[in-house]
Every structure is written in C-alpha cells, then in structure tokens.
Amino acid sequence: MKLIGLFDSPYVRRVAVSMRLQGFAFEHVALSVFRHQDQMRKINPLVKAPMLVLDSGEKLIESSFILDYLDGEAAAGKRLIPAEGAARTQIQQHCAIALIAAEKAVQIVYDTKQRPVELSYAPWVARCTEQMHQAFAMLDAQPVSQVLSGGPINQADITSVVALGFARHVHPAQFPIGRYPRLEQLSSCCEALPAFLETPLE
C-alpha cells in the first residue's frame, strides 16, 4: 500500500500512526498538496491528502474513511475503534471533537499564513481560535486514557495526540505548558511510542 501526503498534516499523520500500530506495511509518498500540486493531481484529481492506494490500485481518500477501512482489514485485536456498541460511539465522538480542533487549527493557518495580511479577517480568526480551544478543553476534560496505565491505545488517543501536536506546532504561543494538562500527559506518553516516533510531525 502507498500512503500519500505529508506527516505535517494531522490527517495524514493519524493514518500513518494507526497503520504502524496495526502492523500494516506501507510506502510513504511524501507529496505536498501545495508544493507538489501537479504530481498530486495526477494521482488524485481532488489534490487532497491523505490518499491510500491499495495493492489492488484502488484509491481511498479522507482519513476517517481510510481508518474505518483499515479497522475492517486489521488482524484480530488490532481494531482501533470497536465494531459496535457504546464504546464505539464514545471513541468516534472523541475523534470528532479532536478533528474539529485540528480543522480549526488548519483554518487559522490558512487565514493568517497562506493569504495576504490585508485579506485576513480578524473576527473569523478569533472565532476559529475560540472553537479550537473549546474543542481541546473538551478533550482535556475527558476521563484519563487507559494508555497512561498501560492499557490499549485507541483511535481517540491517536487523533487527540496528533491534533494537539499539530496545533502546538503551528500555533506555539497558543499552547503554554499546563494549558491542557491531561492532553499533555497523554501526548508525552503516546509521542514516545515507536509508531509516533517513526511518524515525525516535520
């Protein structure tokens, strides 16, 4: 399989970390949706990452769909979201909040760093910033992850840590140490795991 995209994207990184944890071998094709648009367009006319190219040649897009596919293909005991039940709903909801946090962090980057200063709209940036921090506050208020006591990792843990890592990377001034202590503790634990170390943000 081939995973297309850069690890500085929280969406690409969550897929790559998950694949490593589940034992899927893949080739990483490091193409940027900005710097390599022509090359990307030949593979994916939508110019969107991540894209997972299966050994059959079939191309999958959108990180949540890709992860759902991988869960269905994973070996026994390697699912990162349960197939059914209350735990599935809880983890999916947790992931949804983390993805909102990541989405808002991305939108702030686009509005403040990807367009001319005179075209940046301060009220929109303020709104996205508030939404980003509200999402992270909701994640920080979740019960302590089982990972911290040696339990199994799940997709909520992965997506939360990847979202926080991305947001801290692109908006460092917004994330002083101690602002989200539970998330920071989870991040320190997970970022030390081989699957995360082998998938560096930069």
Image (spheres, rainbow, N blue to C red):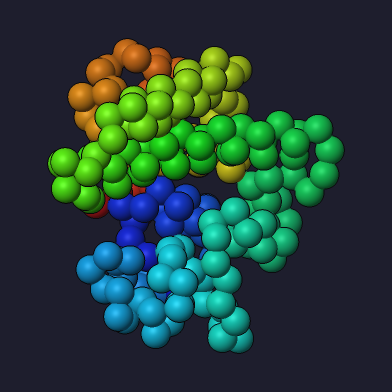
Using the image, determine if residue 143 lies above or below residue 119.
above
- Residue 184 horizontal/vertical position (percent): 38, 23
Q: Farthest residue toward the left?
A: 117
User: Residue drawn 27% across and 65% down?
Assistant: 34
- Residue 199 horizontal/vertical position (percent): 35, 54
User: Residue drawn 55% across and 60% down?
Assistant: 62
Choose between 72 and 108: the one closer to the eye. 108
Residue 36: which quarter of the image?
bottom left
Using the image, determine if residue 78 lies above or below residue 132.
below
Left or right relative to 58: residue 192: left
User: Residue drawn 41% across and 22% down?
Assistant: 130
| Residue 161 shows in the view | no
Using the image, determine if residue 179 lies above or below residue 115.
above
Residue 164: which quarter of the image?
top left
Choose between 26 and 161: the one closer to the eye. 161
Residue 107: which quarter of the image?
top left
| Residue 120 shows in the view | yes
User: Residue drawn 45% across and 26% down?
Assistant: 131
